[in-house]
Image (spheres, rainbow, N blue to C red):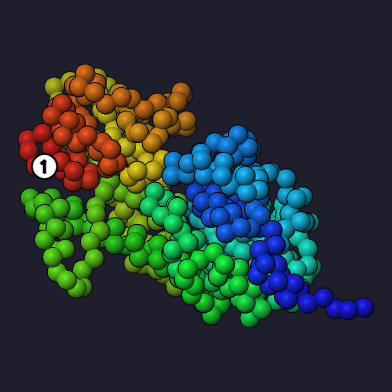
Amino acid sequence: MTKINYKYEILKKIKNKSAKIAVLGLGYVGLPLSLMIVKNKYLVKGFDTDKKKINLIKSSKSYINQITRSSILKAKKEGFTASSNFKDLVNFDVIIITVPTPLKNTNTPDLSFIRNCISGIKPYLKKGQLIILESTSYPGTTEEEIINKIEKKFLIGENFFVVYSPERIDPGRNDNAIDKIPKLISGKTKNCLKVGFSFYKSLFKKLFKVSDLKTAEFTKILENIFRAVNIGFINEMKIISKAMNIDIYEVIKAARTKPYGFRAYEPGPGIGGHCLPVDPIYLHWKAKKFNVEAKFVKLSTEINKDTTNYVKKNIFKFLNGLKKKINKTKVLVLGVSYKKNIEDTRESPAINIIENLLYKNVSVQYADPYVKEIKKIKYLKKKLKSTKINKKNLMLFDLVILTTDHDNFNYDFIYKNSKKILDCRGKFKNSFKVIRA
């Protein structure tokens, strides 16, 4: 009986584009990735346990602002489909996992999405497949959560291939150009790396090989923590500069003129998103397993949380100074997504601020062109819907808070027609109307 060369077989399928690709998790990473792979002439099927997403794709509708309906229609004409049934995986050659890695209520890593995914697909895995984890997590995740759970069934590197290649999608910025971002690739074995490299070479313009899985995982988490630490630093500088009656935005503008040794970060009301508030905690948690206390990493997380608390103190300092009871005050929050020009509200400091205002019985509304409603919010039994920005509306509020600086806000109009503005993003000029926070 002839022995099957599984590496040769999958490399051949990748080369002639006959390999079938499954993407598990159709969120802000999985859906853009799926559409990009389809453009490269592979047959792609997306999988997600959220049946609402599956139904929307079947109806050729997008649930991500940057992904157009026409792009989904075009992908479907090329054979793109979506399903919640993992049984179909037996027909696929490459399986890419792009599921969330959030935090538990105990502020520790929540790998339930990865674990449930592996548990659900394990019965349908077969020899000759390539499985890739793209989700961000602490070093050791691919080994512990994937390889350790399937290695009794397969010979990794011989008849089954495992790769870690972290996603580098920046929602709202590069969703439609992810193939231009250098792609990091690592494998459990040399054969795994060779297969993974061959696959991604057919998709991305630049590739960078990493020596092992843990190094690639650490690289991804370093990239995100680098940003989180620097945002924490500039948020602290904002608080210090205000105490000294210095405009931090003028300081940053001046510092930008130095041609070396300085990289500008913008302060805000805290930190949000699926990575920056989470990844420092992932690494801090994992480092403790090695008896290392990641003090600097932990401190940045605390500073960014303190920044949101600092904003809330500024809000109530103003509201308490009004000649009316706190439950008679009215506040408008501008922007609830965690950053501008997207609809993603995960870990958004604006939501935290709104919930705090509701807890104190302040009448709160919000306006966001990308977020039509907030379905679940503490201290409110019903949905909170976005309100319109017009002259009549603006004048009803005692305070307007800019938390997310969307480009399509008319800042001159807002400034002209608001009584008082608490500016968390430096979009308004200094005047009696504006409070820096």
Report which quarter residue 401 is drawn in. top left
Residue in the image at 14% along x and 69% along y: 258
What kind of residue is marked 1?
Answer: Lys
Mark 1 neighbour class, 10 Å CA radius: few under 14, some 14 to 19, many 20 or more: few
In screen coordinates, is 169 left or right of 264? right
In screen coordinates, is 184 left or right of 413? right
Across and down, in percent, residue 253 comes to 14, 58
Q: Quadrant of the N terminus?
A: bottom right
Can residue 250 be seen from the camera position used here?
yes
Across and down, in percent, residue 388 comes to 31, 24
Residue in the image at 48% along x and 75% along y: 208
Can residue 345 be seen from the camera position used here?
no
Q: Is residue 91 above or below residue 309?
A: below
Residue in the image at 41% along x and 55% along y: 174
From the image, tell me which residue sits under label 1: 429
Which is more toward the observer, 191 or 226?
191
Which is more toward the observer, 1 or 118?
1
Dot 1: element: loop
Q: Is residue 217 above or below residue 176?
A: below
Across and down, in percent, residue 434 comes to 13, 37
Report which quarter residue 58 is drawn in. top right
